[in-house]
Image (cartoon, helix red, strand yellow):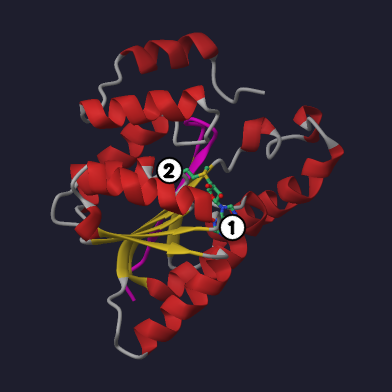
Amino acid sequence: MNITNEKVTAYINGLYQPLNPFLESLRQEAENNAIPIILRETETLLLTLLEIKNPLRILEIGTAVGYSALCFAISKPSSYITTLELQERLVKTAAVNFEKAGVKDRIQIIQGEALDTLLKLEDNLKAGKLDSFDFVFIDGAKGHYLEMWDHCIKLCKPGAVIVSDNILFKAMTASDLYLDHRRNKTIVNRMRGYLRYITSLPGVVSTVLPVGDGVAISVIGEM
Ligand SMILES: C[S@@+](CC[C@H](N)C(=O)[O-])C[C@H]1O[C@@H](n2cnc3c(N)ncnc32)[C@H](O)[C@@H]1O
């Protein structure tokens, strides 16, 4: 089920302006090929947050064809992005897109299971080979957000912003009435646990918004 009113969403999306013609055609291609990329309204929310936060180092979990990473790189020309993707085929496509957009020098794409990569990034941070991040976008496997959060928080600077996408998961997180298939029950339970966790964590301010498929924005308090 769509979590938002369709007419209102259509109106908001009528105001949407693509960042540039390359991203406009990449969005079209991804939508035509059923490749999941951020929704238009999620994109504008992210771009607004980037303007407020002005991050230098951005971590993304879930690259797909590189659409959201390109939004970050293009809207914030001084930023460096590390993006993690499981599927080799998508990593190759994203790398081509980063090159075509002329930003490949500012985006590092790491192929593999995100939880493994996050552990390696933690080791690199401890060894002084990596700087911490000030903006994180979690958009990978929905059943593992909590584990990803636990790694990400260790990789973040105080004051960092963590944005989690698809947290309402077609309204299923809000109520079992919307459950489309029994197999989604585990993901839904985990997502509920994740939202309970990030909204009650001392030192972290989180908000859960019904934008796109649901977006949580968390600010990690200065310690
Ligand atoms: C929703 S898509 C990401 C879309 C992208 N952020 C965008 O908006 O352009 C989620 C991606 O996460 C990847 N993914 C899923 N499980 C993963 C895992 N365990 N480790 C790394 N990547 C994973 C999928 O292959 C998929 O490409």
Q: Is residue 182 magenta?
A: no
Q: Residue at x 33, y 47 (%)?
A: 96
Residue projecting furthest to the bottom: 127
| Mark 1 CB lies closer than 8 A to ligand 1 | no
Residue projecting furthest to the right: 182
Instruction: Identify residue type, mark 2.
Output: Val
- Quadrant, the N terminus: top right
Q: Is residue 210 magenta?
A: yes
Q: Residue at x 24, y 54 (%)?
A: 104
Please give the residue where the numbered disc 2 appears in the rendered image. 65
Using the image as rendered, state which of residue 195 and residue 48 is in the foreground. Answer: 48
Q: Residue at x 39, y 47 (%)?
A: 94
Task: Find numbered disc 2 in the image and state the secondary structure of the residue it sits on.
Answer: loop
Disc marking residue 70: none
| Mark 2 CB lies closer than 8 A to ligand 1 | yes
Query: Residue 118, how many percent across, how many down?
Result: 49, 72
Residue 139 visible to the viewer: no
Label 2: few (<14), some or many (≥20) within 10 Å?
many
Region rendered in magenta? 209-223
Q: Earlier in the sequence, mark 2 or mark 1?
A: 2
Please give the residue where the numbered disc 1 appears in the rendered image. 145
Q: Quadrant of residue 49?
A: top left
Q: Residue at x 54, y 21 (%)?
A: 4
